[in-house]
Amino acid sequence: MKTPDPRPTAVNTPLTDTPRRRAILKQLRSHPTVKGSVIALVLLLATVLLAPFLAPQDPYNLAVLDLMDGRLSPGSASMNGFRFWLGTDSQGRDMLSAILYGLRISLTVGLSAVALATVIGSLVGLMAAYAGGLIDTLLMRLVDFILGFPTILVALVLLAMLGRGVDKVVIAIVVVQWAHYARIMRSRALQERRKEYIEAALNLGFPAWRIMLRHLLPNCLGPVMVFATIQIANAIVLEATLSFLGVGVPITEPSLGLLIANGFQYLLSGDYWISMFPGLALLLLILSINVIADRLRSALDPRST
Amino acid sequence: MTTQPLLAVYGLHTVFHSEEGAWPAVSGVDLSIQPGEIVGLVGESGSGKSVTGFSIFGLIDPPGEVIAGEVLFKGQNLRDLSEEQMRQLRGNRIAMIFQDPLMTLNPVLRIEEQMLEAIQTHTRVPRAQALKRCVEALEMVGIPSPEKRLRCYPHEFSGGMRQRVAIAIAMLNQPELIICDEPTTALDVTIQGQILYRMQEICRTHGTALVWITHDLGVIAELADQVAVMYAGKIVESGPVSQVLDAPAHPYTRGLLDSLPGAIQPGQRLQQISGMAPSLSNRPNGCAFQPRCSHALPQCATSEPERTTVDQRTYRCFAPLVALGPAA
Amino acid sequence: MQSLFVLLAVSVVVFFAVYAVGDPIELLVSPEASVADRQVMIQRLGLDLPVWLQYTGFLGRALHGDLGTSFVHGIPAIELIVQRIPATLELVFVAISLTILIGIPLGLIAGLKSDKPTGRGLMAGSVLGFSLPSFWQGMVLILMFAVWLHWLPAAGRGDTVTVLGVPLSLLTASGWSHVILPAINLSLANIALVLRLTATGVVDAKTQEYVKFARAKGLRPQRILTRHILRNILIPVVTVIGMEFGSLIAYSTITETVFAWPGMGKLLIDSIYQLDRPVVVAYVMLVTFIFVMINMLVDMLYAALDPRVQLQESE
């Protein structure tokens, strides 16, 4: 008489289960802001990859720059008729090009930091869960220790020691973030570890690394991946903040954060575009990632309606 | 000469809205309660008995909604009242007791405060006087050293005591009607007996009417004057307790009686009604009980039985177990 | 106990890390200085000793309250930091006040109207509060209120009045006009957090049985809100605010940099630039100490607010 049973799908079915995956994707697609975010993100990614080709001007080629073009407002033209759609900075650099390159750096740092943190954190969490006992306690104490401090402080002190540089910023972000993944992976692995297929693998005499990596790991990836997507935006923000404070990426490879810092002093005199446009680009990047990550999380959360 | 019923419910319909539509929880319930009368509302989980209680009390929250019916309290239709007017009645002229005494009392507030506010929200009473009433109420429900107990927190009481506190709170303003939603279900059998005894005593003394919602027919047999049996959102049988329990008309009532542990000899298997009560989303066509009924006629599967009234008894069945003629 | 171990571990890590990298001599001595002059400098700063000796020396002095002397300013690092503490504390104090005064009421509204556009809008807007980078928020504030509207100053701290030897700017009008923007900047992320926490707390509480029972007693909605719902949700909210106090001090580094606010945070950034290691080390040690203290305080506060916790302990 009435419509079918609306019981929610089982919590523990793995993500590879197609009906569940389809349901999740459907929920992701349905929300209007998600569509907008995906479009924005794809555009951003495309511009980032194609930056060298798209950017009207290579912002790091000093030969092209002309100081006379410095601090021009958006839309003005240079001496040789070249249009600066987003204005120029104090060195005469085209803001549009600088932003495109800056996006590149920001995204690169964010993605690589999260990727590394995920790998390291997951491995540590996996080991802690698998080994148990003293190793588990020690590793988790370390995790608690790191997570007990505010991220900005740890990152600052680290970079105070390491100096500036893209790789160093990545290292700092990884050090700050990996502990989260370790915790998540560990709790999930502890649950999975008790299941029968792990017992079976143990009985078959598989070596520990094989069980961990080929049996345990794939089933624990879910929550870790969701967390990672959320953390990408956080990593990008952290890098931007560190660069803004002057301890992040070097001047030769400015990320959006550094661009914003460079333009900060001109804010007070009204030349807002040197800071604002990189800022808006950063915002767009973060927001689109956040919206998608948030939707992904609620789609995967079995408690959501 | 009939006195005006204290509470008269006509055609109550309550639904729960969802994406797929409106699931009917209560489909046309009629009740009549005289002053000082104890009416038992019996049914399994999902029968709609608790929803009926909340609907009368006006505490159905979205996604639920009372969509039809009249709830006449002393002649006035409660459904016409504003929320503020209902608020003035609640805890005052009509009270309600819930099932789980741990969760009904706020864990971070002392008993004293939770009782005082029940009084002072309705009448301006000096604190000392209100406290006196609280102590009296606690004594009435049998809580020892009530003055000291007032200063305690809910978690310092046992389950049975907490429920007594809830009853005391309900009685504070001498209501004319108390709706009790399975108040003893979460308690030990021995405690249950004590509470039932107390409730009966209080009601007889103060002339308070009760609607006692439960799934336990045994409790009803002890306590109530009238009984109404609910199944799948409808009242399938009602009438004076002794008559209904001695000679039930509806097969479901018969089934409930038979499944009581006291109904059989030691060593015999416990009787059960086969099958399960339908959930909101899959009520069958025709009579809702038909799939589980051993007396079903062909027409039971296709059409819903109307309510038949004989004297003080009613039933909804095409094949009643007892032929109820005019009063014998 | 455990806290001491944390402090010790942090001191080891920070000391060795900070001292092992970078060469401050380069900064403090002009390139033309003779080798002899350099030697004097090195000896004066104790940099000629092996690292582990430097550490034990450091630890010994630390236990006496001496956390090293600033390379740049020549005065004890602790003194330097302590000078700047009032400014940071002012900022943090105003930020926490804002968090409580704005976050909790807005959260209550969002929770009570959770199914209406107001509530949903508030929740959605709050996401911006903690996902937008703090320095960006600060810049926008400066742009709007200082540059375009000219209502408030863009940087620095206002005039101070010395009370009991401590210069406070909150006692002057100019002090308030200077502190408002940075305080808003510092508190925005926390306001968003508290808003959400309060809102979810209210939504949870609304469906609790005791709220239904309170309605069954015929209580007025205001009373239900203030006496029943609020008491229950305040516990986690207060805990969070307490924990956030520590992170406010940490995040003030950003706000102080954006607004040129002369507090501990700005000192840290400057010291990092100038490779003034003792100050960096002293800062980290101090902040760790503060964190440990705060955690203990929050535990005690929690026990005081939730009678269930208390009773368990006494039994």
Image (cartoon, helix red, strand yellow):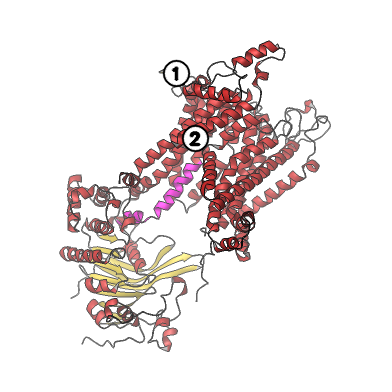
Q: Residue C6 carries which label?
A: 2
Label 1 sits on what residue type?
Answer: Val
Q: In which quarter of the image is residue C171?
A: top left
Mark 2 or 1, closer to the camera = 2
Q: What is the magenta range?
A: C192-216
* Dominant secondary structure, magenta: helix
* The one of C174 and B46 positioned closer to us in this rendering: B46
Q: Quadrant of residue B235?
A: bottom left
Question: Looking at the image, can residue C267 be seen?
Answer: no
Q: Which residue is drawn at 40% across and 60% down?
A: B61
Q: Name the residue under label 1.
A: C161
Question: Looking at the image, can residue B310 be seen?
Answer: yes
Where in the figure is residue C142, as x and y percent of width and height? 58, 30
Label 1 secondary element? strand
For label 2, count other residues whose C-alpha is less than 10 Å away and answer few (under 14), some (14-19) or many (20+).
Answer: some
In the rendered image, the residue lying farthest to the left is: B205
